[in-house]
Image (cartoon, coloured by chain):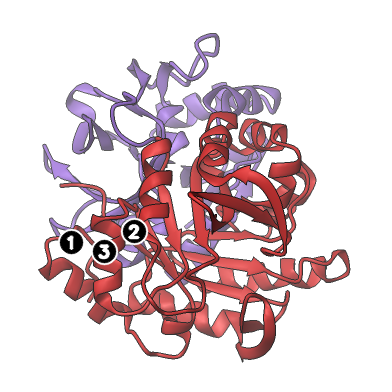
Chain colours: A red, B purple
Amino acid sequence: MSLAHRIIPCLDTDGERVVKGVNFVNLRDAGDPAALAARYNIEGADELVVLDIAASRDHRPTFLETIRRVAAELAIPLTAGGGVANVDEGRAILRAGADKLTVNTAAIRNPPLLTALAAEFGSQAVVLAIDAKRVGDRWEAFVRGGSVPTGIDAVAWARQGADCGAGEILITSMDKDGTRSGFDCPLTAAISRAVSVPVIASGGADTPETFLEVFREGCADAALAASIFHDSIQGLGALKRYLGEQGVSVRQTG
Amino acid sequence: MNVALVEYGAGNLPSVERALARLGVESRRASTPEALAGCDALILPGVGHFGALMRSLGERSLVNPLRDAVSRGTPLLGICLGLQAMFASSDEAPGDAGLALFPQKVSALPPADRLPHMGWNQLRRARPSKLLEGVSQDAYFYFAHSYAALDAGEAGVAYCDHCVPFVAVLEKGNVCATQFHPEKSGPAGAQILSNFVRRAGGKG
């Protein structure tokens, strides 16, 4: 008996529709979030992440409605975020039906935000999302959808963020994101060693072997992917059967 | 049947409502002592902080009405923090008294492994369980917590391990609870909610 490694489909949305693109450019429509959520719920996803990558204030009511529609389809946990800058915005996302919220840019600019969110909703509801890129011999955290470098060391920031109250780290490798060349195992392992909270690896998902690698070598507690699931390149059931056969603890469904 | 969810600001209340609705069970929210008194079964959802939950119940004058409902024999299901609230106290908020339906206390999970204990885990059954009827032995359930009851005496019917064994399902008379979130635990979780409602309705 041990905690299962989680497989987490991610829906990047413009607030309303699922979109796809590399590095947030050349976005194209990839479907209705509620319809995809319903599919992944049945197919054995362990959790779902829904992000508002536009994160404009004008679109916020639309995104909250999207969270409501997605939550209505799920009997699994839902994490949502994108542009959350204060406790009230976090509350709105949780009230709409998310179990956890992600924070990224606002937390780097104002780390006590993590403490305030954890005090209000509990650490288990606060996921610190970090977009990291290899720079020299370390990884640097970027903000605003990966467009703005911060000069901050991603591993040190993960540690500080967990100390401030984040209950989970979602680490996205900008070098790997959209490449389908495998997760960034050294980055994930460095984050995983630095913190005692669960770590979700993101960016680079491809074959079932890439998931095995990130669980074994990257020491990830969960792995997140988008397009390989949206485009039915990889089925959730087959992926979990493979991982189970390789001795990875996963929740088998159906 | 009249199933009421105790409303005191718990974040997971709508999720529980939706899970019940999928089973065809209509529920209502009870936020006053009068509303608690007039229902056939109660669910105490919970997520967040032990002290905040108990203070919130206190501000709404719901602590004694909840205890009275249990004394009258009203079936009560606690979920996650709702399980923890049934104990006398918690390490999370040493100054705040719990509902004390069970005399033991809630402890912090040891920091030897990743915390929170977050994700899907399995159960080890210790005693026959009504909630777990029809649920596969190897089923997974969704947990998200850093505190847990390590002991509930005879009421502990199933345990989970995260460095230490802790109570995952407890049942005693008309009171039962799960440390995991049945409303977030797929078909296995739905079975548990169904078992609770069916037995509360006297059809089980």
Q: What is the spatial separation of the Cα atoms under label 3 and label 1, in whole angstroms?
A: 36 Å
**Foreground: disc 3 or disc 2:** 3
Would you call the spot at circle 2 few (<14 residues within 10 Å), some (14-19), or many (20 or more)?
A: many
Q: Estimate the x, y position of residue A232 in percent, counting from the top left.
A: 39, 90
B136 up-or-down from A193: above or below? below
**Foreground: disc 2 or disc 1:** 2
* Residue that label 2 marks: B189
* Residue that label 1 marks: B134
Task: Check if mark 3 and mark 2 are on a common chain.
Answer: no
* Residue that label 3 marks: A213
Residue closest to the eye, A204 or B95: A204
Q: Amino acid at mark 2?
A: Gly
Q: Estimate the x, y position of residue B77 in percent, counting from the top left.
A: 40, 42
Query: Quick one: label 2 or label 1, which is nearer the N terminus?
Result: 1
Residue closest to the eye, A142 or A43: A142
Residue closest to the eye, B159 or B22: B159
Q: Amino acid at mark 1?
A: Gly
Task: Check if mark 2 and mark 1 are on a common chain.
Answer: yes
Q: Estimate the x, y position of residue A130 in percent, counting from the top left.
A: 58, 53
Q: Amino acid at mark 3?
A: Glu
Would you call the spot at circle 1 few (<14 residues within 10 Å), some (14-19), or many (20 or more)?
A: few
Quadrant of residue A66 in the image?
Answer: bottom right
Q: Residue at x 76, y 71 (%)?
A: A54
Q: In what element is the residue under mark 3?
A: helix
Q: Residue at x 69, y 61 (%)?
A: A82
